[in-house]
Amino acid sequence: MSDIEQKSIDTAAQEVLKKAEAENIQTVWDRLESQQPQCGFGMLGLCCTVCNMGPCRIDPFGEGAQAGVCGANADTIAARNLARKIAAGASAHSDHGRDVAHTLMLLSAGHTHDYEVLDVEKLKTLAVEFGIDINKPKEQITQELAEKLLREFGRQEGELVFTKRAPKKRQQTWQNSGITPRGIDREIVETLHTTNVGVDNDYKNLIKTGLRCALSDGWGGSMLATDVQDIILGSPQPIRGKVNLGVLKENCVNIVVHGHEPILSEMAVKASNDPELVKLAREKGAAGINLAGICCTANEVLMRHGIAVAGNFLQQELAIITGAVEVMMVDVQCIMPALKEVASCFHTKLITTNPKARFPGVEHIEFHPDKAYEVAKQIIKLGIDNFVNRNKERVNIPKQEMDLVAGFTKEIVFQILGGRYRATYRPLNEAIISGRLRGLAGVVGCNNPKQTHDLFHTTLVKELIKKDVLVLQTGCSAIACAKQGLLIPEAAKLYAGRGLQEICEAVGIPPVLHLGSCVDNSRILTAASHIIEEGGLGQDLSDIPAAGCAPEWMSEKAITIGFYFVASGVYTVFGASPFATLGSHNLTDYLTKGLEGVVGARFEFCDDPIKMAELMIAHIDKKRKALNLKPAMYE
Ligand code: CUV
Ligand code: SF4
């Protein structure tokens, strides 16, 4: 394998990496190299900076110091560090949820006219869940719901409303272990409180706090983000799209949206079709305005509008290095600070839009829901004006682009499986019970330059579908597999086992279903709850023959997702280092074994995608056996 093939399996990425090398532009891979060797204490989770008596570190070989200045040992330090990461991850997704709920509030009060209630059905479903009488005007329902949703963040008593969506038995498990999430903000604050110097010193109790915090994201902030986005931006429907750097167009003004919150990128979609702006682009010599996305905001506009995806996390710099991007507009999360430097090598204008996320010296055009469309137009106009500054000699757009189908929600998947007129989970459950489908897998999460870009995602997913496991995806993982052609119906014939193939062909779906962005992992939780409700596959989420995996994760958000999967009863495999906990054998043991006795599921850490698939399949088969189901039909 050449050096570049080590970095990425994606030939489009490889091509741009060669260009970067030739033009001496640093990328994330170069910076990873210059970080070597990375800090050993950090990798083992044995470095503590919680108070000013430190920083402290524990000697992993048992010879030097075994306690920090305050007396904290390896277990306490590693567990505290981990719990703080869970809180940070939960805060990111949940703050996103808050902004979306706030937009719903502004809309209901008439303070923004750029959004409207598009999914009235879903509005009413949520209203009922929140105990709102729906026999009143839509406007009033919206306002009451927005108020109640926002109150979930600061809730001081009771439990998060969405936890009631979980099967009874799961709710009971949460009660018994004391991890039923209360207010979203409360769980995050409590995690920060208890990880302060000299508060909680019991690693198991710290993890308990972390589990509750993670649940407040999965069954709170993230779930709320997903559902409210569906309400105000429309619920996705299966839709075709294109993916990879080849979606950038040489003859067009290329605008790239990158980040997470679709309330901004939605407006960019609308503005890119504005006749006045399109006319302006033509006047500047472009054929039109081409909008493409990176990371989760890309998934959001893909799911709802079929907007092209330029790439996943590790392709953000590469998109700019094509030399063809006029504007990259960013909001929050997963936006590399390096973008400023990379953009400065080209004519590309990097524009920040969120008051929470700025770069010194980078143009900031602040986004507000009350003048959303106006701001989006302003940014796109900057891109149009910038088109003339493009240096044509430095433009190299790789040709690679792949088709995909996205837009699968918990509602849609099962409408399709159940036939056009009857939305039911019965056929899905039957398929699993009969063994035509071996089980389900959620494969999600980021990229990480420590691993060959996209290799783990695609190798793992191919292996799973080959063994008749239907794969549900979100985030950068979905983009990785889409680029390799796994998200088209035709992929069933090429890669899926016979059972999965039969199902895909009967209903015309791909063997790998794209459920959206990272907050849409909540769709997996609700889908799983419906499966239990439908019957025949046990009483609890942990009974379903299913497993989760984040093979190339990097963000704290991925850790949080992992924790709410496990807390929801889903066996979950993580690639790369075990959350930097290896320095505490007790903690690692607890995560990979002990948790089973608390929440009925546990973590596994593994650094080989084929092995990951084997682990997940072994788990699925174990669950089939426990349910007294026949083995998979086509072994
Ligand atoms: Ni929120 S969190 S790199 S964009 S999946 Fe992509 Fe998804 Fe990880 Fe970030
Ligand atoms: Fe050191 Fe304890 Fe302070 Fe951490 S909390 S830095 S271990 S003294």
Image: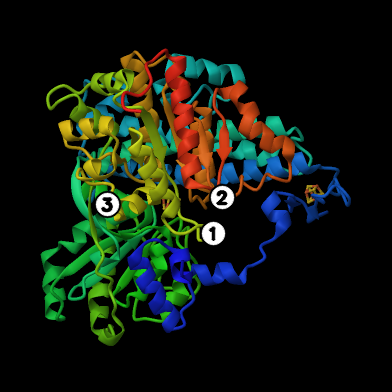
Q: CA distance from mark 2 to mark 1?
A: 8 Å
Residue 532, image quadrant:
top left
Say which residue label 1 marks: 450
**As shown in the figure, which amino acid type bears the numbered disc 2?**
Ala
Q: At which x and y percent is residue 501?
A: 23, 35
* In-image side of 45 versus 393 (left or right): right
* In-image side of 568 versus 430 (left or right): right
Label disc, if present, on residue 576 of the rendered structure: 2
Q: At which x and y percent is residue 475?
A: 38, 48
Of the residues under marks 2 and 3, which one precedes in the sequence? 3
Whether residue 137 is visible, yes or no, is no
Question: Marks 2 and 3: CB-CB under 8 Å?
Answer: no
**As shown in the figure, which amino acid type bears the numbered disc 3?**
Gly
Residue pictured at 50% horizontal, 61% vertical: 449
Residue 563, image quadrant:
top right
Q: Is 416 in front, or is 375?
A: 416
**As shown in the figure, which amino acid type bears the numbered disc 1?**
Lys
Say which residue label 3 marks: 485
Q: Tell me: residue 574, above or below residue 18.
A: above
Element at label 2: loop
**Quarter of the rendering occupied by the C terminus:** top left
Question: Marks 2 and 1: CB-CB under 8 Å?
Answer: yes
Element at label 3: loop
Whether residue 229 is visible, yes or no, is yes
Q: CA distance from mark 1 to mark 3?
A: 24 Å
Q: Residues within 10 Å of mark 2 (few under 14, many from 20)?
A: some
Residue pictured at 38% horizontal, 69% vertical: 14
